[in-house]
Amino acid sequence: MTCNQIDAFLDQQWSGPGTPVPRNVAQHLESCPACRNLLRSLHGGAPGGQPSARVQSEIEKKLLGSLEPVEPLAPARKFTLDLLAVFALIVVVVAGIVGVRSPWRMAWWQFGTLTAVLLAGAALLAASLSRQMSPGARYRIPPRALVFSVATAFLCLSLLLLPWRATSRFWSWGLMCFSFGSVLAAVATIPLWMLVRRGAIFSPALAGATTGLLAGLLSTTVVHLGCANTTAPHVALWHAAVPIFSALVGFLLGNYSRHHSDSSEGRSAGPRA
């Protein structure tokens, strides 16, 4: 047998230490020191196969020095409830300050349907975020599909349920609602992100988009409760634009942070003069 045949035998047929070898293989090993050394290395007896005590000590110091104490992640259900608690607290406080007007401007089924969509979307997004932060968690609804569905559901229902009436203050009133909603969404993102960052963020772009959309729904809920303009063009354009805009900003910021982190790691791991 040749050395190449011995190499192929060890790769494909030999099962490990203690396994008998065929006679022709044994004959070749007796006459070939290189193949004997190869077999000895597979048995764990190759010289230099284990690092020295000094090298092992240096490896342990580097590994232990990079470890930092962390708090255990809360169970997914508690994490979801924490996000929803922040959502509800901000909605109640801000709505109490700016006032509630829309329930008396809409039919009960219009107000109830749109409010239910906002709250259901918030619950689904909070549950999705808790799974995104938990390694190995399974998704009932893919996060990307959920972000798209929640963002468009409120828009479509606003167009279908509310009356189509033009108002003289379409632009001024609309810009006021959108600017207020965007600022509130930015402020609401802070406590939400403080909860999210405690988990394992595997996809910063997706986590940013989901968090931004959740903050946008929170803001839209407040605007939905307090705005007296309940026409389809106003709500579908200006109210629905807040969560869509917030999700886009969250996606861009998350994507930027990922690329910035990758480039920083690449620079630190590059060759040194």
Image (cartoon, rainbow, N blue to C red):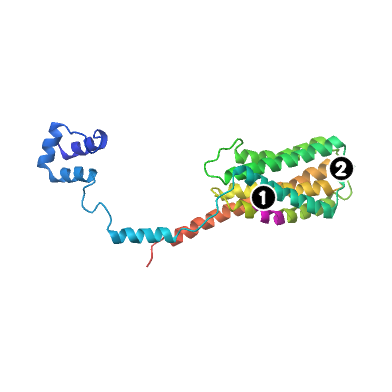
Please check the rendered image and state whether residue 201 is part of the magenta-colored stretch, yes or no.
Answer: no
* Mark before the other along the chain sequence, 1 or 2: 2
Q: Name the amino acid, label 1.
A: Gly
Q: Is residue 244 visible?
A: no
Q: Where the N terminus falls, by quadrant?
A: top left
Q: Amino acid at mark 2?
A: Pro
What label does residue 103 carry, if any? 2
User: Do the residues under discs 1 and 2 have CB atoms within 8 angstroms?
Assistant: no
Front residue of 140/153: it is 140
State which mark lies toward you, 1 or 2. Answer: 2
- Give the SS element for disc 1: helix
Q: Position of residue 40 (x, y in %)?
A: 19, 45
| Total count of labels | 2
Closer to us: 149 or 80: 80
Place residue 190 in its image quadrant. Answer: bottom right
Q: Is residue 45 above or below residue 55?
A: above
Identity of the residue drawn at 83% across and 39% down: 111
Q: Is residue 165 above or below residue 211?
A: above
* Residue at x-position 79% and y-position 53%: 93
- Displayed quadrant of residue 116: top right
Q: Start and end of the magenta stretch?
A: 186-192
- Which residue is identified by label 1? 212
Give the main secondary structure, helix, strand or loop, of the magenta stretch.
helix
Q: Residue at x 82, y 43 (%)?
A: 233
Who is closer to the viewer here, 169 or 126?
Answer: 126
Q: Position of residue 243 (x, y in %)?
A: 71, 47
Residue 140, by quadrant, is: top right
**Gap between marks 1 and 2 measured at Cα:** 26 Å
Q: Residue furthest bottom?
A: 273
> Horizontal placement of 41 versus 239: left or right?
left
